[in-house]
Amino acid sequence: MSDLPVEVSELSRRFGNTQALDKVNFRAEKGKVYGLVGANGAGKTTLIKHIMGLLRAKSGSVQVFGQNPVHHPESVLSRMGYLSENRDIPDWMTIEELMRYTQAYHQNWDVAYAEELLATFDLDQSKKIRDLSRGMRAQVALVNAVAHRPELLILDEPSSGLDAVVRMDILNTVVRTISDEGRTVIFSSHLLEEVERMSDHVTMIHQGKVVLDGPLESLGSAHHFCNVRFEDSLDSKPLLANALATRGEGRSWTIVHTGTAENFSAGIKQLNGKIVESRNATLEEIFIARVGRGISSDEVIK
């Protein structure tokens, strides 16, 4: 039996005429944070549902802790924590009642850890969940998802609609702590800066296919962002080897490229241009270059 938290092989899924997933391969190792990014309809949520056993793999395979999550839901889900953007928790309960209710389903529930997190978030356990702010509800839902110390934590848009302070509480207090304990986090967010700050590894999905996958540090060093200025005004974008995205007009252009800096610089010189800035590309710049569009601040990636 494999010891990998998640191993997805050649997973494909159609819904009618829509190819939601197309031969997707994905694996998650212990102790790392995996960021999933992709625009609406990319297939990210469909992938998560397969990992959780909510959808049966019809083509390809899904293994969670070496088991099929559809065939062995109890043993898989007992080792997993999940938080979605909807934060579906019963609002008629108090926080204390919710903690006791969830504890009954988890043998590994850590009362002291739950109390510590609730205190960190300064949450009054006597309050009804329906009386909490959106940010407080998110904090309660997160404690509810992690207090049994899951080996695998799946966060699907955990900070959607939350203010910056609450987002930092969730990310810094929990996500990194869990990964530092040798546990695994799969973390999806439409906030690419957030994914970039928290993730060790990034998987980019577009139209059901994995278009980029690897350690974040390697992806950043393999993609370069350059500001270029040419001696003469250009009527059309310059054609350069390994250029993924080229934007600008006249003499000033920005280019995201792969390959070596030396080869790119030589190509620029041949066109009578000069590189005025060169650095590793950000995750957002890589995403736009690979997918061809940005993600608006109010768009939820699926």
Image (cartoon, rainbow, N blue to C red):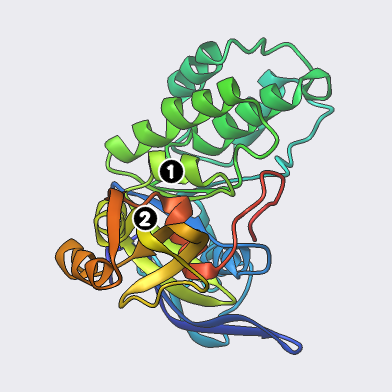
Q: Which residue is mark 1?
A: 150
- Measured as percent of width and height from the top left, residue 284 is found at 48, 52
Along the line of sight, the residue nearer the viewer: 115 or 164: 164
Q: Which residue is mark 2?
A: 229
Q: Quadrant of the C terminus?
A: bottom right
In the rendered structure, which amino acid carries the disc numbered 1?
Pro
Task: Please identify the residue farthest to the front as the structure is shown.
Answer: 232
> Does dot 1 land on a helix, a strand or a loop?
loop
The residue at the point 68 percent across, 25 percent down is 135
* Residue 300 visible (yes or no): yes
> Does dot 2 land on a helix, a strand or a loop?
strand
The residue at the point 34 percent across, 54 percent down is 226
- Measured as percent of width and height from the top left, residue 218 is found at 24, 57
Task: Please identify the residue farthest to the left as the structure is shown.
Answer: 262
Q: Residues within 10 Å of mark 1 (few under 14, many from 20)?
A: many
Specify whether 147 is left or right of 41.
left
* Residue 63 visible (yes or no): no
- In the displayed structure, 125 sits above or below 204; it is above
- In the displayed structure, 193 sits above or below 59; it is above
Specify whether 56 is left or right of 241.
right
The residue at the point 64 percent across, 33 percent down is 141
Along the line of sight, the residue nearer the viewer: 46 or 246: 246
Specify whether 23 is left or right of 240.
right
In the rendered structure, which amino acid carries the disc numbered 2?
Arg
